[in-house]
Image (spheres, helix red, strand yellow):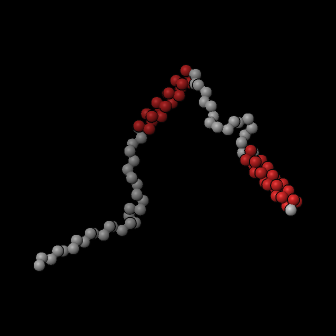
Amino acid sequence: MARNVVRKLISAAIIVTVLTGAASAQIPMGLSIGAPEKRKLTPEEQAKQDALDQAYKSATNKIPDQSTNDPWANVRPAPAPSVKKKQTAK
């Protein structure tokens, strides 16, 4: 009975070790877990980033509005006309 318990403990320890090794292999060395720290931009870098943002916004504003494209429009059948029931006067 004691051997059975020891075997289970050793098996559990091996499984935990293997799973921990596989998980730790996915993390690059020297990288802390959590959100990466952002450094402050220098005034020159900030000005360059602002210019890039402005250029992007002006370029996206120049794109014309796209109409919806329905490639299946000619394949679908026309909707059936709605039939109204006639009311008979008694």
Q: Is residue 79 above or below residue 37?
A: below
- x then y, percent, for residue 2: 87, 59
Q: Is residue 54 left or right of residue 74?
A: right
Q: Residue at x 73, y 47 (%)?
A: 23
Quarter of the figure with the N terminus: bottom right
Q: Residue furthest left?
A: 90
- x then y, percent, for residue 38: 60, 30
Q: Residue furthest front?
A: 1
Q: Quadrant of residue 58?
A: top left
Q: Quadrant of residue 44?
A: top right
Q: Is residue 18 visible?
A: no
Q: Is residue 4 left or right of residue 71?
A: right
Q: Residue at x 77, y 51 (%)?
A: 16
- x then y, percent, for residue 10: 84, 54
Q: Residue at x 55, y 21 (%)?
A: 43
Quarter of the figure with the C terminus: bottom left
Q: Nearer the viewer, residue 67 or 88?
A: 88
Q: Is residue 59 above or below residue 71?
A: above
Q: Nearer the viewer, residue 49 or 18?
A: 18
Q: Residue furthest right?
A: 3
Q: Is residue 63 visible?
A: yes
Q: Residue at x 32, y 67 (%)?
A: 79
- x then y, percent, for residue 85: 21, 74
Q: Is residue 77 left or right of residue 29?
A: left
Q: Quadrant of residue 69?
A: bottom left
How many numbered discs, if any? 0
Q: Is residue 54 above or below residue 20?
A: above
Q: Residue furthest bottom?
A: 90
Q: Is residue 84 above or below residue 43?
A: below
